[in-house]
Amino acid sequence: MNNPTLIQLSTDYVYCSSDDDNDNEVIENTQVIQPQDPAILDDECSGEVDREYTGQFEGPEKTLEVCFRRKDGLAEVNEPGKRAGLRTLTRSELDVVCNKARCTILSQISNQNLDAYVLSESSLFVYNYMIIIKTCGTTTLLRCLALIIELGRRRGLDLDWVGYSRKNFNFPDDQQFPHGSFMQEIEYLKDHKKLCEKLDGNGYTLGPITADHWFVYVADQTIRSNIEDLDNDRVLNIMMFDIDQEVGDIFYYDHYESKKDGDETKEEAVKRISFEQTKKAGIDALCPGALFDPRAFEPCGYSMNAIQFNSYFTMHITPEEGSSYASFETNQKLASYTALINNVVRTFKPKRFVMTLMADEHGLKEIKGNPLTDSCLGSKIVVPKKPSMVSDSSEKMITYKRTDIASIKVEDDCCCMMGNWTIQDPSKSSTGYEERVRGMSFA
């Protein structure tokens, strides 16, 4: 291996080597050289330091989606297997992007259309002209946006579209700058010297401010006459809270230690336990035929990326009792999402869940089955109870009722929808009274 050389990307430094990337191999447990400690002061850092872990974790992810177009005005390269644009980014460049967000790459899978990376704090997906980063916890996702735009510019790309979204935080006081509140995030994007002239976007709030709600920021620079079909024309996200405790127990790492083979390496144990958790929870059945890259964490937690043709699936689970959470997201284009949603909810049996959908107008019209747009009766999600929960006199099914829904059309043709579902209490359903679930913050 050649000695690494030091190069500069804007104000960030990163080590890069001359090793060739393997485009189609699963890369596991990759060691990442961090160019700087995330807590070191820089031009965007307020001097914060990591807080001690308290047993509570901010599961719901921040999501950043950035799309580009070619500067020369020519058609995008969409031939399967042909790397262009953002898929020519080196591993070292991706490392420094993740460092800005305070996370690291753990493993990678690829196919002819995209690269998917499991991160220490969620996931990264890279297409030729689109990059999607999801990060949870106290990551600083927006800090990497200026660098992503600069890296795109160096590859002959112009900014086309930026979308940032997240649910209101459960533990807002734990967040780092610029994620102290949605207003702070908007001000950061408007005041940043490298972003203010490029974005000119707007922020929106969907859902009741007294319960779970969804923040969305969109900056649209799309020249629509040049775009026939976007890879991300619909993204479905299901955020589940207070998941079934027996399901959550599957994702504790030490439950599998007793099975460890004496000759098994640490890396082999992580791989084995990751796939055991995937199978035991039934996650593999949610994405049949897809290429999986699961990751089990110590002492608990789980992340999974799966890719199939031009689509990605991703799951992230934090099973800690009191703040348990599981999310499922996909950009797969389906005529109906009803069966998929039912299967996801049945797998985790949460006490409540939030569903969001972001789609272009044409993509939304193609969807025939969608609980976000169905009538009140049609929007109910019904799943079977666990056998241990069923008695002769009890209901055999769990019914989730949609408590509210919000939608908005932003910019020209981007449709955003968000709804809340909670378990319907059979004893109260006849009276028409439903207990309201209160949100934990407005931030």
Image (spheres, helix red, strand yellow):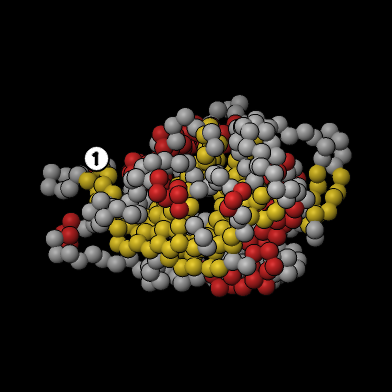
**Residue at the spot x=67%, y=33% of the render?**
82
Query: Badge 1 is on which residue?
Result: 387
Residue 33 to residue 58: above or below:
above
The answer to which image quadrant residue 293 occupies is top right
Relative to residue 411, is residue 395 drawn left or right? left
Quick check: can you spot residue 55?
no
Seen as rendered, the residue at the extreme front is 225
Relative to residue 95, is residue 57 drawn left or right? left
| x and y percentages locating residue 404 in the rendered image | 32, 63
Which of 7 and 407 lies nearest the eye of the viewer? 407
**Residue at the spot x=38%, y=63% of the render?**
406
Quick check: can you spot residue 374?
yes
**Residue at the spot x=61%, y=54% of the render?**
223
Which of 230 and 119 lies nearest the eye of the viewer? 230
Identified by mark 1, the residue type is Pro
Looking at the rendered structure, the number of numbered marks drawn on it comes to 1
| x and y percentages locating residue 52 in the rendered image | 59, 63
Residue 31 to residue 216: above or below:
above
> Mark 1: which secondary structure?
helix
| x and y percentages locating residue 403 in the rendered image | 30, 62
Relative to residue 196, is residue 325 drawn left or right? left
Instruction: Answer few, some or many: residues within 10 Å of disc 1's Cα (few below 14, many 20 plus, some between 14 and 19).
Output: few
The answer to which image quadrant residue 390 occupies is top left
The N terminus: image quadrant = top right
The answer to which image quadrant residue 45 occupies is bottom right
| x and y percentages locating residue 262 in the rendered image | 58, 27
Relative to residue 91, is residue 327 drawn left or right? left
Residue 180 to residue 98: above or below:
below
**Residue at the spot x=74%, y=56% of the render?**
150
Residue 30 to residue 379: above or below:
above
